[in-house]
Amino acid sequence: MTATQAPRLQLLDGGAAITASALAAGCRFFAGYPMSPFTGLLESMSRELPEVGGVCMNAESEIEAVNMALGASAAGTRAATGSCGQGIALMQEAVAEMALNETPMVLFNMARNQQDYFQCTRGGGWGDYRTITLAPKDVPEAVEHTQLLFHLAEKYRAPVIMYGDPILAQTQVGVEIRELDFGPLPPKDWALDGSTGGSGRSRQIWTWAMGKTTDPGLGPDGQWRMIAEKFAAIEAVEQRSESYLVEDAETVVVAFGTAALFAAHVVDELRAQGHLVGLFRPITLWPFPATALEAATRSARRVLVFELNAGQMLDDVRQYVYDRDTVRFIGGVSIHDSGMSFGPLLDAAPIKERILAELDRPSTQEVAP
């Protein structure tokens, strides 16, 4: 990754920062339906996109929004949409179609909490596909991830997701907005730009991939096998994570997104008190960083999973941790009374209390056979 221009420091909230980064990445079409905490991003796009010659559509529903963006992307435009988890749920049929007919798209899930993990990593559409999902810990990382997602969407011709939340969407911080270069991309020889009409070389984007009579294409079986193989290849090479103080850790806390920032603060406090605690943060929720998690937990007596839900990432941790008998869940459902944000569990004090409670319990290595 390289920067192609000097950075420019600005004080922006998350929605405005993501907008500025998307424009720097070349996004020129956005469509969405207002739904908190996504609304701020949509409002920012509506102000800024026309200034660079782009189009922002305030759609009448999330279904209309995602299909508008799909059409723009099919024509070769860098396009995006988004919502919170409830709205993303309505988009799932179109997301599956994008994956199966290989239309790149960036979706911003400004979630109300961390209960959309299954939605982002398992999906709700049909067919053999997955969605690359990045979960930034803060606004500066979201700025970088925005441009990376546009790159990955075109590199793999697939829908990709940013998993945000109210903290990410609404926090104001100083950020540097600059165009980032992640390397060359393949030509858009698939785009429906009208340039080949009447030439005998016209194109189509279609999930069934039947092709024209003069070019029968892969057919359904061949197309779907190719898609499955593509996502298997993505899983092998696009795993991203961050390990913090895990080398000598007897206890490793696993957390994602902004919740990982709170967990990291608690890890520092516990380290200062003499406890050998570390943190593992999945950056890609899919593909889940399995290899790195195994390495980070190889010497741990306890692996504590903190997430604001009933235990969703917990499934992946149990699957890929070095010793699944060390895994314990310290998260839980915790939602603000408004239903729009996190509840009281997202705070340093209760996280620290739950970790200390587990440190007082014997680990699997300490229990006599």
Image (cartoon, rainbow, N blue to C red):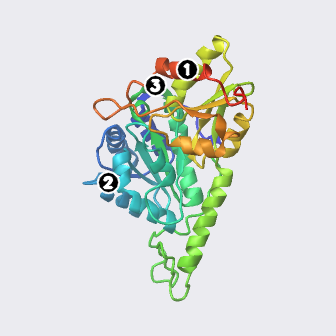
**Where is residue 195 shown, x and y percent of the image?**
47, 73
**Label 1 element class:** helix
Where residue 330 appears, x then y in whole percent? 52, 30
| Residue lying farthest to the left in this orientation | 60
Task: Write down the residue under mark 1.
Answer: 357
According to the picture, the residue beneath numbered tag 2 turns out to be 62
Mark whose residue sits in front, 1 or 3: 1
Left or right of 84 on screen, residue 332: right
Q: Which residue is mark 3?
A: 173
Residue found at x 58% / y 59%: 156
Q: Quadrant of residue 300?
A: top right
- Res 353 seen here: yes
Q: Earlier in the sequence, mark 1 or mark 3?
A: 3
Residue 363 percent across, percent down from the top left:
66, 27
Assess disc 2: are there few (<14), some (14-19) or many (≥20) residues with their C-alpha within 10 Å of its C-alpha: many
Q: Which mark is residue 156?
A: none
Q: Residue at x 64, y 11 (%)?
A: 272
What's the amino acid at mark 2?
Answer: Glu
Asked if the residue under mark 2 is in contact with the one under mark 1, i.e. CB atoms within 8 Å, the reply is: no
